[in-house]
Image: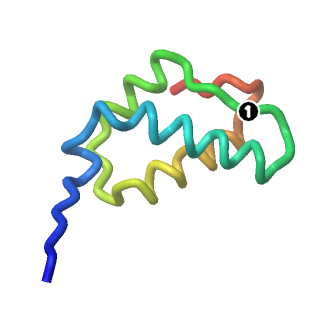
Amino acid sequence: MIEIHVPSLRDRAEDIALLAEGILDRLASRGGGDRARLSTAALQELRNYPFPGNVRELENVLERGVALAVDRELSP
């Protein structure tokens, strides 16, 4: 048996920007609209959040942000 250990997202804050970009790309292609982008402040808030739900929670946060955003830049 091969065991693979994947650290939780809260332990990999440096990966959040790349993961968020991929999620925003996927949301834009699924919705057919322009791609949303994260403000610097929003990205910092995401990096500081402990993410108990891991990547799925990040995806849910971004999906809600895109749905509620006034423009294409997501801010805190």
Q: Residue, x 75% and y 42% (percent of image)?
A: 28
> In the figure, is residue 15 to the left or right of 33?
left
Q: In the rendered view, would you say 55 is above or below 36? A: below
Name the outermost residue toward the front: 1
Disc 1 packing (10 Å; few <14; some 14–19; many ≥20): some
Residue 65 at what x, y percent from top left?
62, 40
Q: Residue 57, located in which quarter of the rendered image?
A: bottom left
Question: Label 1 amino acid?
Answer: Arg
For disc 1, the marked residue is: 35
Q: In the rendered view, would you say 7 is above or below 23? A: below
> In the figure, is residue 47 to the left or right of 26?
left
Q: In the rendered view, would you say 1 is above or below 14? A: below
Front residue of 42/22: it is: 22
Secondary-structure class at tag 1: loop
Front residue of 68/15: it is: 15
Residue 48 at what x, y percent from top left?
29, 32
Q: Quadrant of the N terminus?
A: bottom left
Q: Residue, x 19% and y 44% (percent of image)?
A: 11
Residue 42 at what x, y percent from top left?
48, 25
> In the figure, is residue 60 to the left or right of 49?
right
Q: Residue, x 81% and y 32% (percent of image)?
A: 34
Residue 58 at what x, y percent from top left?
45, 49
Q: Residue 39, located in which quarter of the rendered image?
A: top right
Q: Residue 54, located in which quarter of the rendered image?
A: bottom left
Front residue of 22/63: it is: 22
Q: How is the image coloured?
A: rainbow
> In the figure, is residue 35 to the left or right of 76?
right
Name the outermost residue toward the right: 32
Q: Residue, x 33% and y 31% (percent of image)?
A: 47
